[in-house]
Image: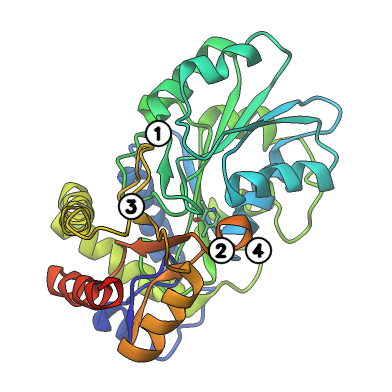
């Protein structure tokens, strides 16, 4: 089995090993120290502004999205602009709906990039926050965070960024784009087991929204998590084996450097995309792509059948799509423990199926 999926992804055996060791007890000074070190490493990878804080929550990425919406936004004070460009953007809209946060969803057509012109109608319209993905994973579409950051600065909006799939794949500078919240999860490009989400919080959002304001969620309260993290702790029992994997992975990133990691994702994506261009019958959409994955329009072939066929006949697992694109779009991930020869195998398998 080889996973070209977008979470969980192919894992490094050394990471698996790090999570398989006997677990430590966590209400100790040693564990707290390790947590605080991981916080520092995580914030450094994002170039978070000074006085930012990081928290780790035991939940998949959606839990972090829900934590952000319920801990930061307030039905009486806020009006959110949600970039609804695919299933993950739509999830932010669903969360606002559920928690009765007034919002407007900017629906982005399949082929369209998020541009300044698309945001223009939403200027000076009473919004207080922009909720968006850096990369909309359902399509592999990447948004321009510099432009979005400029829009938020100009309009005085909080910027809440779901970087679940783009973290470590596409460059992201928290200081540069002025994000107030950046969230990600363990099972994407971090390539750890699922179960842990990571959030970086700006000093501004901490002071203005996470200090006095009560959260409407008990388990997912960011202020509670933040309060505990001051001493390197979590309010509830964390996913300890995933935290052990994270400690290993952050150490590795410290040694190899963020740029090397980003380059590796970019180079795998470029390699695959170059090969795929030689294969008539498959088409890569024209919008701006994230390096986390390549979307493939399968033309005459049924995308879901192709996914099942590849999985069952070759053990190569690509990512199917749900919803309206289920039969037309496949996604090939570039996250995790993959090398060029893995893509050679995938290309060869695709070639025989297109013949
Ligand atoms: C994977 C992903 C999530 C979270 O999904 P979970 O299944 O809850 O981990 C959220 N946003 C984006 C952009 C993602 O790619």
Indicate the secondary structure of the residue bearing disc 3: loop
- Which is more N-terminal, label 4 or label 1? 1
For the residue pair 310 and 184, the one nearer the viewer reads as 310
Q: CA distance from mark 3 to mark 4?
A: 47 Å
Which label's residue is closer to the chain start, 2 or 3?
3
Q: Of marks 1 and 2, which one's residue comes earlier in the chain?
A: 1
C-alpha distance separating marks 1 and 2: 34 Å
Q: Quadrant of ligand 1?
A: bottom right
Badge 3 is on which residue?
A: 283
Pointer 4 residue: 235
Please state the total of marks drawn on the protein image: 4
Q: Which residue is at a point 48% across and 31% down the rendered structure image? A: 179
> Of circles 4 and 2, which is in front?
2
Q: Within 10 Å of the Cα at label 3, are there few (<14), some (14-19), or many (20+) other Cα atoms?
A: some
Give the quarter of the image for residue 126: top right
Q: Front-most of 201 and 108?
A: 108
Q: CA distance from mark 2 to mark 3?
A: 15 Å
Depth-wise, is mark 1 or mark 4 nearer the camera?
Answer: 1
Please say if the residues under marks 4 and 2 sit with CB atoms less than 8 Å apart. Answer: no
Could you tell which of marks 4 and 2 lies nearer the N-terminus? Answer: 4
Residue 174 is tagged as 1
In the rendered image, residue 256, in percent from the top left (x then y), is placed at 14, 58
Query: Residue 326: which disc?
Result: 2
């Amino acid at each position: 089995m080889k996973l070209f999926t977008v979470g969980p992804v192919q894992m490094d055996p050394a990471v698996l090993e790090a999570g398989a060791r006997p677990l430590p007890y966590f209400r100790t000074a040693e564990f707290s120290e390790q947590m605080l070190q991981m916080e520092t490493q995580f914030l450094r990878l994002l170039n978070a502004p000074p006085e930012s804080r990081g928290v780790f929550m035991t939940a998949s990425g959606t839990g972090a999205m829900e934590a952000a919406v319920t801990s930061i936004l307030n039905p009486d004070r806020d009006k959110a602009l949600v970039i609804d460009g695919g299933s993950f953007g739509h999830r932010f809209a669903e969360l606002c709906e559920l928690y009765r946060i007034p919002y407007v969803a900017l629906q982005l057509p399949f082929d369209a990039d998020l541009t300044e012109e698309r945001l223009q109608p939403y200027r000076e319209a009473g919004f207080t926050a922009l909720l968006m993905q850096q990369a909309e994973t359902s399509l592999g579409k990447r948004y321009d965070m510099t432009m979005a950051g400029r829009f938020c600065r100009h309009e005085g909006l909080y910027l809440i960024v779901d970087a679940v799939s783009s973290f470590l794949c596409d460059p992201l500078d928290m200081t540069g784009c002025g994000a107030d919240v950046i969230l990600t999860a363990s099972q994407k490009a971090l390539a750890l087991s699922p179960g842990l989400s990571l959030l970086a919080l700006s000093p501004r959002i901490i002071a203005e929204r996470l200090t006095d304001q009560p959260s409407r969620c008990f388990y997912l309260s960011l202020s509670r998590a933040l309060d505990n993290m001051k001493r390197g702790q979590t309010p509830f029992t964390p996913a300890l084996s995933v935290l052990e994997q994270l400690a290993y992975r952050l150490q590795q990133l410290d040694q190899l450097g963020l740029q090397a990691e980003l380059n590796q994702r970019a180079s795998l994506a470029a390699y695959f995309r170059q090969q795929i261009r030689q294969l008539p019958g498959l088409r890569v959409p024209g919008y701006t792509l994230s390096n986390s994955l390549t979307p493939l329009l399968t033309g005459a072939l049924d995308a879901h059948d192709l996914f099942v066929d590849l999985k069952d006949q070759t053990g190569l697992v690509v990512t199917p799509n749900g919803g309206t694109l289920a039969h037309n779009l496949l996604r090939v991930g570039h996250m995790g423990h993959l090398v060029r020869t893995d893509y050679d195998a995938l290309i060869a398998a695709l070639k025989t199926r297109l013949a």
